[in-house]
Amino acid sequence: MLLDDKLWTGNIFLGGEWRPGRGGTYDVTEPATGAVLGRIGRATPEDVTEAARIAAEAQRAWADTPHPRRAAILRRAAQLWTEHADEISGWNVREVGAIPPMAGFALHVAEQECYEAAGLPARPYGELLPSEEPRLSMARRVPAGVVAVIAPFNVPIILAIRSVAPALALGNAVLLKPDPRTAVTGGVTLARIFEEAGLPPGVLQMLPGAADVGEALVTDPHVRVISFTGSTAAGRRVGALAGEHLKRAHLELGGNSALVVLADADVEGAVAAASFGSWFHQGQICMTTGRHLVHASVYDRFVEALAAKAANLPVGDPSREQVVLGPIIDAGQRDKIHSVVTRSADSGARIAAGGTFRDLFYSPTVLADVSGDTPAFREEIFGPVAPVIRFGDDDEAVRLATASEYGLSLGIITRDVMRGLALADRIPTGIVHINDQTVGDEANSPFGGVAASGTGSRFGGAAANVEAFTETRWVTLRDKPPAYPF
C-alpha cells in the first residue's frame, strides 16, 4: 500500500523520514460521517526551521543531478498516480468529500502535471545575448532554491502537485504545507509518490500545520519562493509578509466568476453548463460559477430550469452512495455558506431551490431576483449556490461582470462566438471559456487570476512554470581579463 498508515500515523515527513512533529498529533476525519480515519503529525515553526536547513543542503545536489535522471523521477511519479489510483481516490472521497468523478479528475491532473514537468529539465535554460565587449554573454535560468508550497483543503492533490512537480523538475527543493483538514490526500500522498519515485531525501518535505507554520515558511531565510493557493484574505497577508522579506510570492486566490448567458444562447445547454459550474465539488472550487448573468429575454426560463435541475440532484455520502454533491468540508465552512444565503434572502433575493442543509450536506441552491447589492453577488460563497441576475444589453452585462474585486475565470454562452470573444475582451480575467462554464484545469495551460484573484498565471505550461520557479542570471565569459585604465 502506498498510504500504509504504519508510516504516517502521528508523523510528518522531514528530512526523508516519517517522524513525529513537534506539535503532537491530531485526528484525520471524514466530513460525511465524522468518523476518524487516522492520526497525523502536526508540524511547528521549529520543524520548519529544521526542514528548510535540510532542504537547502539537499537542493544543491538535486540541482546538479543530470537532467535525464530528474525527468525519469517525474515520469515515475506520474506512473505511480495511475498504479495507486484506487487507493488514492478512496482517500480523496473520504477525507475531502469528493465524489468519485472528481477524485478521478484530480488523479488525472496529477499524472499529467508530472508528465508535463518531466519535460522541463531538458528545456533550453538560457539564451545567448549580443555584447559590445569581446566576450560571450548569456542569460541562464537557474533554480530558485527552496520553494514553499502552501495548498488548501478543497482540491488538495491538484493545488499542491501543480507547484510541487514543476518546482522539483527545475531543480528546486520543496517544503509542502497541506491544509491540516486534508493532509493525507494533499500531503502524505505526494510525499509517498515522490519517495517511491526515487526522489532523494530532503528534496521534498511535508509539514502539516496551522498559520504559524505557514508564516515560518514565508519568513525562513532559506525559502526563496512561496507558492500559495487559498483565500484572498490569507493571500494578502502572505504577499505582504513575502514582500517584507523580499521574496517572490505566487498567489492564486479567491474568485467570484461570472457566467454570461446571452439572448441567443441555447437555454438548455446554458443550464447544463451553469449547474456544473456552480455545483461541481459542492462549489468548493476557486473557479466555481459564482454569478449567473442572464439576458432578460431568457431569464425566467433559465431560473426555472436551473431550479428544476437543483431539485433533482442527489446529495449524500460519496463513499456509500451514487451522488452528485458530497459534504462541505466542515461546519465552519457550511455555516459561512448558509449565512450568505440567508443574508441574501433577507435582502430581497428569492430562494428558487435549496437553501437547506443536513449535517454537512448542503443542497444545491438557486437564488433568483439577485441585485448588485445582494451578498451572494458580492462575496465568494465557496459552496453550491447559484445567484442569478438579469441584464438588458452587453454594456450592462460588462458592468455587472466587472462589479467584483475578483478576476479569475469567465464563461460566456452564445451562438456567436466572435461576439462572445469581443465581450470577453471587455471583462478582465485570467481565464475565459466561450460556450462553457468557468471551471477547468489542464496541466499544459497557464492558470491564474488578476486583481483580488491573484498575481496572474503562475502555474501551468512550461513558460509559466519556468518563470515561477527559476531565477535569471547574467553570465559572461572572456578568454582573458581585459585591461582597465586604473
Image (tube, helix red, strand yellow):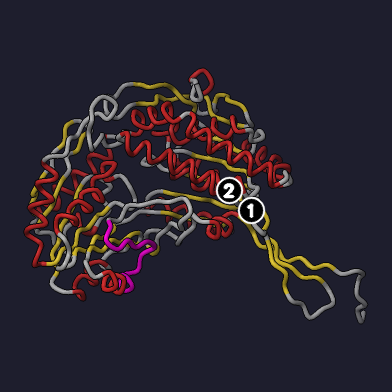
**From where the camera sits, is residue 106 visible?**
yes
Is 228 on the left or on the right of 284, as rendered? right
Amino acid type, residue under disc 1 in the picture: Ala
Q: Quadrant of residue 333?
A: top left
Q: Where does residue 1 sit, x and y in percent of width and height?
A: 50, 21
Disc on the earlier residue, 2 or 1: 1
Q: Residue at x 61, y 48 (%)?
A: 223
SS at circle 1: loop
Q: Residue at x 48, y 24 (%)?
A: 3
Does the magenta-highlighted stretch encompass residue 247?
no
Q: Please, is residue 410 above or below residue 191 in the view?
A: below
Mark 1, Cα crowd under 10 Å, few <14 / some 14-19 / many 20+, is many
Mark 2, Cα crowd under 10 Å, few <14 / some 14-19 / many 20+, is many
Amino acid type, residue under disc 2 in the picture: Ala
Q: Please, is residue 423 above or below residue 222 in the view?
A: below
Is 119 on the left or on the right of 265, as rendered? right
Q: Magenta stretch?
A: 424-436
Q: Residue at x 38, y 58 (%)?
A: 453
The residue that mark 2 highlights is 167
Is residue 140 or residue 184 the one in the foreground? 140
**From where the camera sits, is residue 215 visible?**
no
The residue that mark 1 highlights is 144
Q: Where does residue 2 sit, x and y in percent of width and height?
A: 51, 25
Q: Quadrant of the C terminus?
A: bottom right
Q: Where does residue 326 sit, x and y in percent of width and height?
A: 25, 34
Does the magenta-highlighted stretch encompass residue 430?
yes
